[in-house]
Structures are given as structure tokens and as C-alpha cells.
Amino acid sequence: MATFDPCAWCEEVLQPYLDRNLTERERVEAQAHLDSCGACAKRYRFEENLRQFVRMAAIEEMDPELKERLASLRTPLL
Amino acid sequence: MGESPETQGRQLANEARDRVRFEEEALQLADQVYRVARRLVHSKEEAEDLMQETYARAFRSWRSYTPGTNLRAWLLRILTNLNIDRGRRQQRAPDTTHLEESDYFLYNRLEDDSHDSFDEERVLQRLSQDDIVDALAAVPHDFRDVIVLVDIGEFSYQEAAQILDIPVGTVMSRLHRGRRILKRHLAEATVGGE
């Protein structure tokens, strides 16, 4: 019979954990493992930082000229 | 029997007021909509065209928006539909099963590659903004769309499902696979391919 590997399970639930999409029971279970396992906690911290890094890097603001062009598409007031 | 001129006048005034309010709210969201649009397509010009088409259509069909619902999601629904209609993305996503790695792939590659102490907080500094943008652009569009909506646009799974008109389960599976594909590209950008 396969034994339960909490580190492998933690890897499996990494994304739903960070998306806050685990059930409360699963979240508590994952948290308990993360509190006791430095290797997994380190990987989770990395993933969390990575997401933030990707979000910041991917943001490109629009040109003010485009905003003006969009505003000019409004229906003229009679 | 026709309505009195006063009633008609009041209706027109109310409608004009609602329309102006709608247009103002939609324009206030333009920055946020653009951030998503910019990453859905490859070039800045395409993103700008798409924004203008989206806003032109939104201003024409403002009556079909239900006040009180998520206007940002409504605008992005128009935008993603226009993007598909314009045939920019007719090609199907290639089967990427064989490209997929585990969720820890990037971490493990960076750790293997670091000779001394591995600092998970600082290792990301090896990635430039261009690395991230290029890696994201290299993700097949079906996967990229959900990553852009959820991770950059900060939409919920449900909102992304409504915008793309796909089931929530599909959003989740594409998101999970797409993020792994993204990490594989990022690993290639930092420590090179296999």
C-alpha cells in the first residue's frame, strides 16, 4: 500500500492553496505541514513571490493618447 | 395612446443621464482593461486597436449592460470576443502535454543552478521584465488567456469562465497547466533549456 507523502501532496495543492481555493480542512492540513516542513514552506514562498513578480512585470500602462481616443468614442451630447 | 411630451422628455433625460454615467464608469476602467488587453495580444498596436473596437462597441450597446454587475468583466467579455472574431487566434493550441513539468520545476532548476546558498527571495532578480513578458507570450493562447485574466486581471475563476464562455473547471485546468508551462519558459530564460 502506498504511504501518504505530505510533501508530494503539498506540491499537488500548491496552486489551489495560493488561489485560496482549498476547503477549510485541506487548508488547515496544508498549513500544518508547511509549519513543520521548511523545504515545502520555502517552495511555497518562492511561488508566492513569483506570482507577484509576474504580475508586476506584465503590467504595461496605456498611453494617455489612447485614453483620449477612447473618450472621443463617446456618444456626443445633443 | 402616446405619452405626454413631458413624460417623453423625462425618459430621454433619464436615458441620457444613464448613458453618460455608463460611459464615465467604462472609461474609468480603461487602464485596468488595457492591462489585460495588452497581454492577450502580442503587440501594443493590436492592444490599442482592440481597446478602441471594444469601447466603440460598448458605447453602442450600453443598454445591454445590467447596472450593478461587474462592468470590467462585461468589457473584457466584449474584448475577448472581438479578439477571437478578428481571427487573431484561429490556430488551435498545440498539444503541450509533453511540455509540462511539475509545479516545482522552476524552483528546482534554479536551486540546482545555484552553487552556493539558494535564496528563494532573491533568485527572482535573475529574471528581467522582458523574460517574464516573453515567457508569457510564448504560452499557447488558450492557457495564456486564463493566466492573464486571473493572475494579471485578478478576476475570479467564475468571472474568467463567464468572460471566456467556458466552464469553471476548464478555467482551473487551463490555469494550472498554463502556469506550469509559463514556469518552464521562465526556467529556459534563466538557466537555459535541458
Image: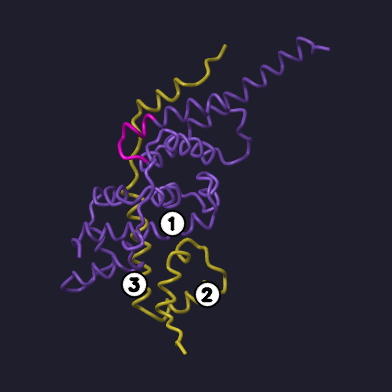
Chain colours: A yellow, B purple
Q: Residues within 10 Å of mark 2 (few under 14, many from 20)?
A: few
Residue at 53% over, 45% down: B165
Residue at 52% over, 71% down: A27
Q: Amino acid at mark 2?
A: Val
Check if residue B48 falls in the magenta segment.
yes
Q: Residues within 10 Å of mark 3 (few under 14, many from 20)?
A: some
Q: Position of residue B192 (x, y in %)?
A: 18, 61
Q: Residues within 10 Å of mark 1 (few under 14, many from 20)?
A: many
Q: Nearer the viewer, mark 1 or mark 2?
A: 1
- Nearest the viewer among A76 and B122 is A76
- Nearest the viewer among B30 and B80 is B80
Q: Amino acid at mark 1?
A: Leu
The residue indicated by pointer 3 is A42
Q: What's the distance in space between the residues labelled 3 and 2, CA to CA? A: 18 Å
Predominant secondary structure in magenta?
A: helix
Q: Chain of mark 3?
A: A
Q: Amino acid at mark 3?
A: Lys
Q: Describe the element under mark 2 as helix, strand or loop.
A: helix
Does A36 sit left or right of A60 as displayed?
right
Q: Chain of mark 1?
A: B
- Nearest the viewer among A66 and B40 is B40
**Span highlighted in magenta in the image:** B41-49
Q: Position of residue A20 (x, y in %)?
A: 50, 63
In which quarter of the view is residue A5 placed? Answer: bottom left
Check if residue B143 falls in the magenta segment.
no
The C terminus of chain B, quarter of image: bottom left
The residue indicated by pointer 1 is B175
Q: What's the distance in space between the residues labelled 1 and 2, CA to CA? A: 23 Å
Q: Chain of mark 2?
A: A
Q: What's the distance in space between the residues labelled 1 and 3, CA to CA? A: 22 Å
The residue indicated by pointer 2 is A28
Q: Describe the element under mark 3 as helix, strand or loop.
A: helix
